[in-house]
Image (cartoon, helix red, strand yellow):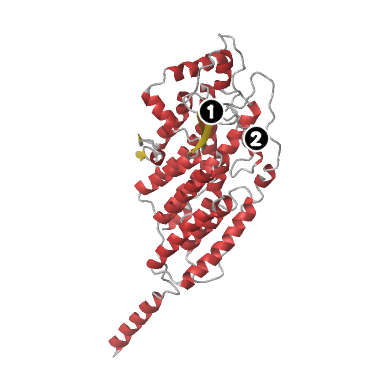
């Protein structure tokens, strides 16, 4: 009789421990986050976001996801109190919240708010919810998780609203100058300079936009013995002699979201991924290759997106301080009016090289997560008609991204070298100042 009672109690306890309303949680996997982040990238391409603005689209949703997941996983530390102005997210009020569903739904809501084509994000949500229902998700679990996600979303949005982005939307355009070394609009669209006030955006880890000021560009001079003239002629000669491999490298890392094409009297745009979108794509590739779970994948996206966001703020601060003329403008004016760069010159000042800054910062972040000597095949640009490229490490990829700007004819070497320095400084600062891993919890386990 005692044995029968014992087994009954064991069964009774097991039955209620597995009650769907209490402990059973629908499984949410890293692939769900990857599909969401890919959708965000697809929408940023469709909506033609500039590189700096796209970095903002990635970072806030990524942080929303991470903060929710970190509440459940004690081996990771929340970023509240570590990032500028971020306060702790509210705790859930309902008992049956699935933190993983809430984390991705908070990401979805925040992403949807930051883009234009909301219907495309809604398409992702419809498919994802249907998939979760097939995995056994109950209506109560969904409702509780969504309610909590909305609370977190509102918290993140309130924080984002204080970053000066809205204020910069109404600020003045970049004024043109008659000084010979200052930036001018470039062909074929002769667009106005984008985001001249991006240095006013609140950084995430940087103390200020000008925390890491690179060495200034070489003094403008058309004297043949001057450093500036020599690096100008280097760009000229490299493009004239660019071979197939260098042209492929330049095209692979072009990442110009709005390339203008002219055929006769017809002008049309080709939409492409941004530099930040390329590195978020690499983050997905690395996470899948590592078989990283949802938490580790969120860690990778979040650290990389913070590096990208602060990298753009730091770089854009220097771009509009030095306001340096692009190679195309001065070469056409002074050396060869038939010369064209390998890549279309993007619409903002030359110094420093944005891809050099953000690629170095992002590569540092990914190295922190997945280690050095992490070999991978970068297929990010395949959907844009370009072949994959293989790399032995994230830093090797970032170095190729940097030098691609010389092969493309859109940057001087000094802008590349100082851009790498700038990106390294941003990456080092994030590594030293932001603790993602909870070492105490890891030691206890």
Q: Is residue 139 left or right of residue 198?
A: left
Q: Nearer the viewer, residue 118 or 52?
A: 118
What number of labels is visible?
Answer: 2
Front: mark 2 or 1: 1
**345 up-or-down from 228: above or below:** below
Quarter occupied by residue 155: bottom right
Q: Vertically, is 275 above or below 131?
A: above
Provide the secondary structure element on which disc 2 rests: loop
Tag 2: Cα neighbours inside 10 Å, few (<14), some, or many (≥20)? many
Q: CA distance from mark 2 to mark 1?
A: 17 Å
Judging by the rendered image, the residue that carries numbered circle 1 is 345
Q: Position of residue 201 (x, y in %)?
A: 64, 42
Question: Residue 9's x, y, as percent?
Answer: 35, 83
Q: Which residue is identified by label 2?
A: 196
Q: Position of residue 190 (x, y in %)?
A: 60, 29
Q: Farthest residue in the front direction?
A: 265
Return the mark for residue 434: none
Q: Quadrant of the C terminus?
A: bottom left
In the rendered view of the protein, which quadrant contains the N terminus?
bottom left
The local crowd at label 1, few if under 14, some if 14 to 19, many if 20 or more residues have their Cα within 10 Å, is many
Compared to residue 21, the image places residue 98 above or below, namely above
Residue displayed at 45% across by 74% down: 22
Camera-nearest residue between 333 and 283:
333
């Amino acid at each position: 009789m005692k044995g029968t009672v014992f087994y009954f109690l064991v069964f009774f306890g097991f039955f209620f421990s597995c009650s769907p309303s209490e402990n059973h949680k629908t499984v949410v996997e890293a692939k769900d986050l990857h599909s969401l982040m890919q959708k965000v990238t697809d929408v940023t391409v469709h909506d033609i976001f500039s590189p700096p603005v796209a970095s903002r689209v990635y970072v806030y949703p990524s942080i929303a996801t991470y903060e929710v997941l970190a509440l459940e996983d004690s081996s990771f530390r929340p970023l509240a109190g570590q990032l500028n102005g971020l306060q702790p997210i509210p705790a859930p009020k309902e008992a049956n919240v699935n933190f993983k569903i809430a984390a991705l739904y908070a990401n979805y809501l925040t992403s949807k708010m930051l883009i234009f084509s909301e219907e495309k994000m809604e398409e992702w949500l419809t498919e994802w919810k249907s998939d979760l229902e097939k995995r056994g998700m109950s209506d109560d679990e969904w409702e509780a998780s969504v309610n909590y996600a909305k609370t977190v979303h509102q918290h993140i949005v309130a924080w984002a609203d204080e970053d000066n982005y809205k204020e910069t939307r109404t600020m003045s355009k970049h004024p043109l100058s008659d000084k010979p070394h200052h930036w001018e609009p470039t062909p074929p669209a002769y667009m106005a300079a984008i985001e001249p006030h991006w240095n006013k955006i609140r950084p995430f880890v940087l103390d200020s936009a000008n925390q890491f000021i690179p060495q200034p560009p070489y003094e403008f001079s058309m004297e043949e013995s001057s450093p500036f003239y020599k690096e100008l002629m280097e760009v000229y000669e490299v493009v004239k002699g660019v071979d197939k491999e260098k042209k492929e490298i330049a095209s692979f890392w072009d990442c110009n979201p709005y390339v203008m094409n002219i055929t006769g009297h017809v002008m049309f745009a080709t939409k492409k991924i941004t530099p930040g979108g390329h590195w978020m794509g690499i983050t997905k590739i690395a996470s899948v290759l590592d078989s990283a779970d949802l938490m580790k994948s969120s860690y990778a996206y979040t650290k990389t997106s913070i590096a990208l966001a602060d990298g753009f703020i730091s770089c854009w601060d220097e771009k509009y301080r030095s306001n340096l003329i692009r190679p195309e403008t001065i070469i056409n004016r002074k050396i060869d009016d038939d010369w064209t760069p390998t890549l279309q010159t993007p619409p903002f000042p030359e110094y420093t090289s944005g891809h050099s800054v953000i690629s170095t910062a992002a590569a540092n972040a990914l190295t922190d997560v997945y280690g050095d000597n992490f070999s991978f095949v970068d297929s990010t640009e395949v959907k844009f008609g370009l072949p994959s490229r293989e790399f032995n490490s994230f830093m090797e990829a970032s170095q190729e991204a940097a030098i691609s700007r010389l092969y493309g004819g859109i940057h001087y070497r000094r802008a590349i070298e100082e851009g790498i320095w700038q990106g390294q400084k941003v990456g080092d600062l994030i590594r030293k100042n932001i603790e993602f891993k909870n070492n105490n919890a890891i030691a206890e386990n």
